[in-house]
Amino acid sequence: MFAEFTGPDPPDSRQWIAAPLSPATAVITVNWDVVFSAIEATALSTWLRESPSLWVFPFVLILHTVGLAFVVGANLVVDLRLLGWVAAVPVPTLRRYVWVMWGGFWVNAFSGVLLLIAYPTKALTNPLFYVKLGLIAAGMGEAQWIQRRILREPGLSEGIVPAYLKLLAGASLICWMGAIAAGRLLAYTYSRLLASDI
């Protein structure tokens, strides 16, 4: 079955037609402006965007910034120590930052979803948004890998950091710097703020 969206502009989300294709192939074409408009029309999205209260959109931005400080700050401490800075800090003691990093990550995930609900068109039509998500995924994956090695690497208690961990720590720093830069640039590089902005 081939489902293709047709209809007037703006399209009605209920107007779908089906045309036969080979039984093994199914293709769905989605008009994303309809999806973005539907999200932007929800009460939550409208409230986040239009509420004059400082406890709404500005507070969500503050939560996102605080979560960022914890997730990146915890990773920064671990990465810099593995790279040889602050050599007086024993590597095994870095385990305590794992919960700080994950706490910051979940605060960021929660506040990030709220920001996305407020302005889905702004984020999802900007390629930098996907760069940011990719860098965050890479940074969190590297952090998880590093944490597992900190718990299992026998020589780390003596302060011996293998070259592969130093390489991962350097790559992790690059990912987090890139994610911060991409996130910051999102405010200035969007082409459309709302679905109605064509």
Image: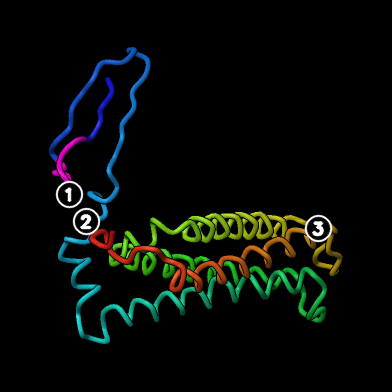
Identity of the residue drawn at 80% across and 67% down: 157
Q: Is residue 105 left or right of residue 18?
A: right
Question: Magenta residues, as a range?
Answer: 6-13
Alpha-carbon span between mark 3 and mark 2: 54 Å
CB under 8 Å between discs 1 and 2: yes
- How many residues crowd mark 3 within 10 Å: few (<14), some (14–19), many (20+)? few
Q: In which quadrant of the rendered view does residue 168 lie?
A: bottom right
Query: Of helix, strand and loop, which one carries label 2?
Result: helix
CB under 8 Å between discs 3 and 2: no
Q: In which quadrant of the rendered view does residue 46 lie?
A: bottom left
Task: From the top left corner, tell me how far across and down residue 30 is, in percent.
Answer: 29, 39
Amino acid type of the residue that numbered disc 3 sits on in the rendered structure = Pro
Q: Nearer the viewer, residue 144 or 139?
A: 139
- How many residues crowd mark 2 within 10 Å: few (<14), some (14–19), many (20+)? some
* Marked residue nearer the N-terminal end (3 or 2): 2
Task: From the top left corner, tell me how far across and down residue 107 is, in percent.
Answer: 42, 70
Q: Looking at the image, is 7 positioned above or below residue 114?
A: above
Residue 48 numbered tag? none
Query: Of helix, strand and loop, which one carries label 3?
Result: helix
Task: From the top left corner, tell me how far across and down residue 113 is, in percent.
Answer: 35, 62
Please identify, in this view, whether the residue under mark 3 or under mark 2 is nearer the observer.
2
Q: Is residue 8 magenta?
A: yes
Residue 154 numbered tag? 3
Amino acid type of the residue that numbered disc 2 sits on in the rendered structure = Ser
- The residue that label 1 is drawn on is 10
Q: Is residue 114 left or right of residue 78?
A: left
Q: Looking at the image, is 64 positioned above or below residue 196?
A: below
- The residue that label 2 is drawn on is 37
Identity of the residue drawn at 77% across and 75% down: 90
